[in-house]
Amino acid sequence: MSFPLILILAAVVFSVLGWITNTYFGNRSLKDSKVKAADIIENANIEGENLKKEKLLEANEEYYNLKQKLEDEFRQKKQSLQKQEQVLNERDTNIDRKADFISKRESELAQIEKNLTLQDEQLQSKQRRLNTLIEEQNVMLEKVAGLSSEDAKKILMDNLMENAKQSAAKMINTIEEDAKREALKRAQNVVVSAIQQSGINMAIESTVAIVSLPSDDMKGRIIGREGRNIRAFEIVTGIDVIVDDTPGSIILSGFDPLRREIARIVMEKLVADGRIHPGRIEDMYEKVKVEMNDYLQELGDQAILECGIHGLNPELIFLLGKLRYRTSFGQNVLQHSKEVATISGIMAAELDLDIQLAKRAGLLHDIGRAMDQQTDSDHAQVGAELARKYNENPVVQNAIAAHTGKAEPASPIAVLVKTANEISKTRPGARREAVQSFISRLQEMENICLGFDGVQSAYAIQAGKEVRIIVNHEKVDDVMLNQLAQDIATNIEEKVEYPGHIKVVVIREYRGVEFA
């Protein structure tokens, strides 16, 4: 057999074998695929059944929830309807009761009307009989008196008119007296009610402040070496420092409440800080002055808020805050001003006047006292000028100017403010004359000192027994110090009445300051 034939036979054999093998494996793969397809279909059917059951459960749950919600809504509506039904039943019961009451009243009124008709008929019968008797009596009187009916009527009318005039005069007099008593009583009630409703407690202002110390060792630090700290403090603040044997405290004495309060805060801050020396005292004093200005503005805002007043100029609000540290005969001026505003507003309400305007005028009536170095004699005029400067209502300006009696009131509100001011300052316990006269004397002494050329500041200390004066070193030299002290002492002696002696101390200080 040749080689090509062998190759052909081999190829045929391998082809047959390949076809048989391919057919075998193809049938086997097809069988496996059918098995896998059957498994997939079976799993899909199982998953479908499970998903169907889950959805069915979800649908049942949603149905149950919806059913519960509808049942709750139905139950609530049912309860609401039952309540409404109960209310309607109660209303029906009340209506039935009212109907029975009205029916009963109608029966009573019908009976009363029937009785009145009967009485009216009886009265008409009596009136006819009375008229007949009067006519018969008139005929008899004409025969006896020899007067005609017209003449008798004229005489009778004249007598009746005279009696009526006398009775009317007496009645008018009685009515006038009753009206005066009632008006006085009502006015007293209004004033008493105004005082009661204002209800502001007054405290007599003192001229000293006490500062607590953590220990008595602090007293030595406050005094300083050879007393330099305490002298610097008194010069800067103008307040006398009293260091005595009282444990744990020192006393600050001064007649000006604002100056004394600033000194108290400065001393407390210095004690808390522990660093006390002249430079530190000056720095702390300037810092506290700035803080005090903010505090005064807050006090003014609080005052207008309490009185219900709006639209006040910020400068006037600041001056109102300063009144917290002003006194008049021992009476705090800010508390007094709020009390006057309250009383004025209450009386204005009783008289049907402008309540807000009355309160505004009452609150601002003593604003002139907030200005520094002003005496009591001109504070009303100063206040009126301030009100005019800040465009206050002319009624308010006049009320401020007229509350001391030196100007004529131009409106009822001005009269109310003047009256409220008298009520507030003259009620028992509101003022103390001795304190105010003492403070006025100290203010007058300071003003006399400030009137001299070269004087920068002046402070009355030691309860008015000493005046300490700070001068400008450029205008006053050392030679002029004694002469200036003598001139001031002579002027005080001529113009001020005081017991004992007053020490006049003039201080000239020169400082050289450089920066490195």
Image (cartoon, grey):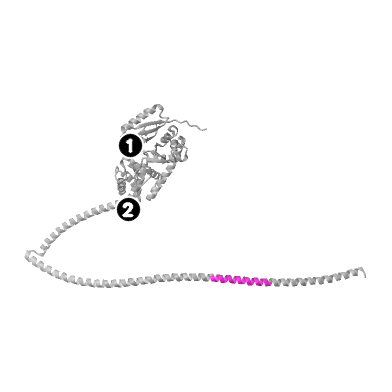
**Looking at the picture, how far across and down is residue 376, in whole percent?**
32, 40
Disc 2 element:
helix
Which residue corresponds to mark 1? 441
- Number of marks present in the image shown: 2
Q: Is residue 343 visible?
A: yes
Rendered image quadrant of residue 144: bottom left
Q: Which mark is residue 349?
A: 2
Q: Of residues 302 and 503, which is closer to you in this image? A: 503
Give the main secondary structure, helix, strand or loop, of the magenta stretch.
helix
**Looking at the picture, how far across and down is residue 271, in whole percent?**
45, 39
Q: Is residue 201 positioned above or below 31 on the image? A: above
| Foreground tag (1 vs 2) | 1
Q: Is residue 386 positioned above or below 62 on the image? A: above
Mark 1 neighbour class, 10 Å CA radius: few under 14, some 14 to 19, many 20 or more: some
Q: Is residue 388 visible?
A: no
Q: Is residue 53 positioned above or below 183 on the image? A: below
Q: Check the image and name the residue furthest to the right.
A: 1
Mark 2 neighbour class, 10 Å CA radius: few under 14, some 14 to 19, many 20 or more: some
Q: Check the image and name the residue furthest to the top.
A: 479
Does label 1 or label 2 sit earlier along the sequence? 2
Rendered image quadrant of residue 126: bottom left
Disc 1 element:
helix
State the residue at coordinates (48%, 69%).
73
Q: Is residue 104 left or right of residue 237?
A: left
Name the residue type under label 1.
Arg
Name the residue type under label 2.
Ala
Task: Give the quadrant of the N terminus.
Answer: bottom right
For marks 1 and 2, give the CA distance.
41 Å
349 in the magenta segment: no
**Looking at the picture, how far across and down is residue 248, in whole percent?**
42, 40
Q: Of residues 407 and 96, which is closer to you in this image? A: 96
**Region in magenta:** 41-64
